[in-house]
Image (spheres, helix red, strand yellow):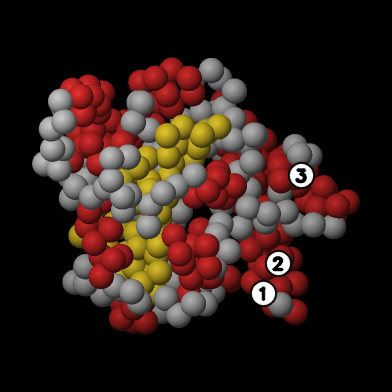
């Protein structure tokens, strides 16, 4: 039964003075009682996957009292109005611009009423009715845990990366690969395969559940430093400074398409990949010091430019229209970033100060 049907039933019930305490769980999402959980989704031109996400809440309605807030980062495509009509139970908020993921999350939190906040990507989909309730119940009953997340299943049916480490040198892919090869026993001890709850150093921002009180205490998402990427690593780091754990529930699953608004075409892909590099520099600048900081910046700079040149030179001709074009655009975007960073003397994304 859909949300619009629930609302029509509600009008009839209120008019006739009937007790609504036993009404279907779906009514809990339209503001009839205290809100346990505010589900915040930041959208940018991801309407197709957002439809799947919102429809999955209609199919698999959580039992707890919740609200859904969708923050549109100024998509400027005329879709927010028809979506607001299609999903009247959802609170749509329009951002003043494409101000980044962290800014959108904070705007959603500003408009939330829940005791807990669940930040979801628009390309996440519920596959059963228990997932959200299980995440919430775990967070409620484990005060030592600051952030709770779950297993994310990609379109191929495989779980996405779950083992995340705090060492900033592991940002670099080939160093991370060497670390995994040379520290297998240590990794297996930290992440035993038979355990259903893992405690990584950080989790991806696609599924983040946190108590609002703690969220505000740690300073929320850092919207002044990060436009896109690594804001999740930064948030987890701030939570761990409060002596709280990061928990990943491996027996709770959500589908994750991974890339609802960031992989539509070569130009968008280039921006996305260059922002990964940008935010890695920002994170290093914020969380490392001295010679270690200098070396990390230098290694990432050299590694990024060399790897992109190699990709361009050795990509097979059969992939000309996609791979080579994308890699050229990525190299151009990254080169532009480094030039602006040198001129402005800042590692922050140019998108944060409108120099795009």
Nearer to me, 213 or 73: 213
356 left or right, relative to 104: right
Residue 184, compared with residue 247, is above or below; it is: below
Residue 94 image point, x, y percent: 55, 32
Can residue 106 be seen at all in this image of the molecule?
Answer: yes
Alpha carbons under labels 2 and 1: distance apart: 6 Å
* Quadrant placement of the C terminus: top right
Local SS, label 1: loop
Identity of the residue drawn at 46% across and 32% down = 92
Can residue 162 be seen at all in this image of the molecule?
Answer: no
Residue that label 2 marks: 285
Local SS, label 2: helix
Name the image quarter holding residue 124. Answer: top left
144 left or right, relative to 227: left
Identity of the residue drawn at 16% across and 31% down = 17
Discs 2/3, front:
3
Q: Seen from this angle, which residue lies furthest right?
A: 343
Disc 2 or 3, which lies upstream in sequence?
2
What's the mark number on residue 353?
3
Residue that label 1 marks: 288
Alpha carbons under labels 1 and 3: distance apart: 24 Å
Say if mark 2 contacts mark 1, CB within 8 Å. Answer: yes
Identity of the residue drawn at 56% across and 20% down = 77
Say if mark 2 contacts mark 3, CB within 8 Å. Answer: no
Residue 5 image point, x, y percent: 20, 23
Residue 8 image point, x, y percent: 22, 22
Nearer to me, 161 or 34: 34
Disc 1 or 3, which lies upstream in sequence?
1
């Amino acid at each position: 039964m859909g949300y619009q049907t629930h609302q029509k039933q509600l009008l009839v019930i209120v008019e006739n003075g009937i007790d609504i305490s036993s009404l279907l769980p779906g009514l809990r999402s339209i503001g009839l009682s205290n809100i346990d959980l505010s589900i915040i989704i930041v959208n940018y031109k991801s309407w197709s996957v957002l439809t799947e996400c919102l429809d999955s809440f209609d199919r698999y309605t959580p039992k707890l009292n919740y609200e859904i807030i969708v923050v549109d980062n100024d998509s400027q495509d005329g879709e927010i109005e028809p979506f607001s009509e299609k999903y009247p139970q959802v609170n749509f908020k329009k951002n003043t611009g494409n101000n980044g993921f962290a800014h959108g999350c904070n705007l959603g939190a500003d408009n939330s009423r829940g005791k807990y906040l669940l930040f979801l990507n628009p390309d996440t989909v519920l596959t059963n009715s228990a997932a959200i309730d299980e995440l919430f119940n775990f967070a409620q009953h484990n005060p030592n845990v600051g952030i709770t997340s779950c297993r994310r299943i990609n379109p191929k049916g495989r779980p996405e990366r779950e083992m995340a480490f705090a060492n900033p040198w592991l940002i670099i892919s080939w160093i991370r690969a060497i670390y995994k090869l040379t520290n297998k026993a240590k990794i297996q001890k930290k992440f035993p395969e038979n355990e259903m709850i893992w405690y990584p150093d950080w989790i991806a921002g696609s599924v983040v559940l946190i108590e609002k009180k703690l969220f505000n205490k740690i300073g929320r998402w850092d919207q002044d430093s990060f436009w896109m990427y690594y804001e999740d690593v930064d948030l987890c780091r701030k939570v761990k400074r409060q002596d709280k754990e990061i928990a990943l529930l491996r027996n709770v699953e959500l589908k994750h398409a991974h890339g609802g608004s960031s992989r539509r075409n070569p130009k968008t892909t280039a921006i996305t990949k260059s922002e990964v590099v940008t935010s890695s520099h920002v994170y290093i600048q914020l969380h490392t010091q001295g010679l270690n900081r200098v070396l990390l910046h230098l290694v990432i700079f050299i590694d990024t430019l060399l790897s992109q040149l190699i990709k361009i030179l050795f990509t097979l001709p059969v992939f000309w229209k996609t791979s080579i074009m994308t890699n050229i655009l990525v190299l151009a975007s990254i080169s532009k970033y480094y030039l602006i960073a040198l001129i402005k003397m800042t590692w922050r994304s140019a998108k944060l100060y409108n120099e795009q």
